[in-house]
Image: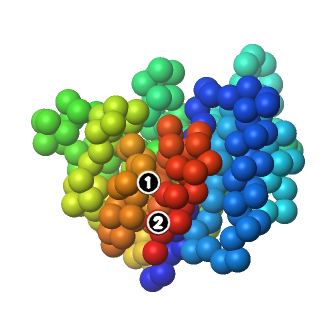
Amino acid sequence: MARRPLIAGNWKMNGRKADGIALAAGLAEKMKASKSHSFDMLICPPATLLSDVAKAVAGTGIAVGGQDCHMKESGAHTGDISAAMLSDLGCSAVLVGHSERRTDHAETDEIVKAKAAAAHKAGLLAVICVGETLAQRDAGQTIAVNKSQINGSLPEGTTADNTVIAYEPVWAIGTGRVATPAQAQEVHAAIRAELAVKLGPGAASAMRILYGGSMKPDNAAELVSQTDIDGGLIGGASLKVADFWAIAESCP
């Protein structure tokens, strides 16, 4: 089954208002100038920039997403933002379970699952992140860890239409290290096989699985050419218009 590649940018905790608007406007111009393209594009700025970025890319086909959401719709949760609030700001997607959230905020699979369910309820695409640490890879636990996170993090009602999986080897995020195309493909194939067990072969075949570990313009083409890699979740390279666009254009 042909899956349309998705190139997603996670800006993390970077950018003030002027920076964010300039970056979004630059991507908007690239998209407007592109007569045709083989990819979907999603950008996930900090919550402070969501409204301005959504306005800057309106009508271009570039989707905007949050970097996280709370599992509840509202309530006494100081500092949090709900999936419904993200939708209200113009978002169509949200990242959940990023390794930095799992590590820095002790998010478990159960929490990630609840956040993904909240995203689905609000009509958002949930980009569910999974991935192993260096210690787990060195211990030969890569496949087992990712299968476990898939099983623990996907809520009831998960489909290829409301969910994207992002495989992000934790040891390759922001380190300059990157899994080889063969290593990445091996894990992506294992994730798809586990999705087939959990959701059925049809849903597994249709679901997009992104690679999220230091993808850059010089390695993107080889990575996205792999059978089970359907785009990328980009960190540092998403903060430069030229680099992010070059990665997007590498999609077959």
Circle 2 crowding by C-alpha within 10 Å: few under 14, some 14–19, many from 20:
some
Single out the residue that lies furthest toward the bottom.
1
- Nearest to N terminus: mark 2 or mark 1: 1
Colour mapping used in the image:
rainbow
Q: Which mark is residue 217?
A: 1
Is any part of residue 195 visible from this angle? Answer: no
- Residue drawn where x is 20% and y is 30% of the image: 135
> Could you tell me which secondary element the residue under label 2 belongs to?
loop
**Contact check, label 2 and label 1, Cβ < 8 Å:** yes
Q: Which mark is residue 125?
A: none
Residue 23 point in image, percent of width and height: 70, 42
Question: Relative to residue 212, is residue 223 depicted above or below?
Answer: below
Residue 54 point in image, percent of width and height: 81, 47
Amino acid at the residue labelled 1: Pro
Asked whether 70 or 9 is in front, the reply is 9
* Left or right position of 59 against 79: right
- Residue drawn where x is 58% and y is 43% of the image: 240
Is any part of residue 230 visible from this angle? Answer: yes
Residue 136 point in image, percent of width and height: 21, 35
Mark 2 sits on what residue?
250
> Could you tell me which secondary element the residue under label 1 belongs to?
loop
Q: CA distance from mark 2 to mark 1?
A: 8 Å
Asked whether 194 or 129 is in front, the reply is 129
Residue 210 point in image, percent of width and height: 45, 57
Amino acid at the residue labelled 2: Ser
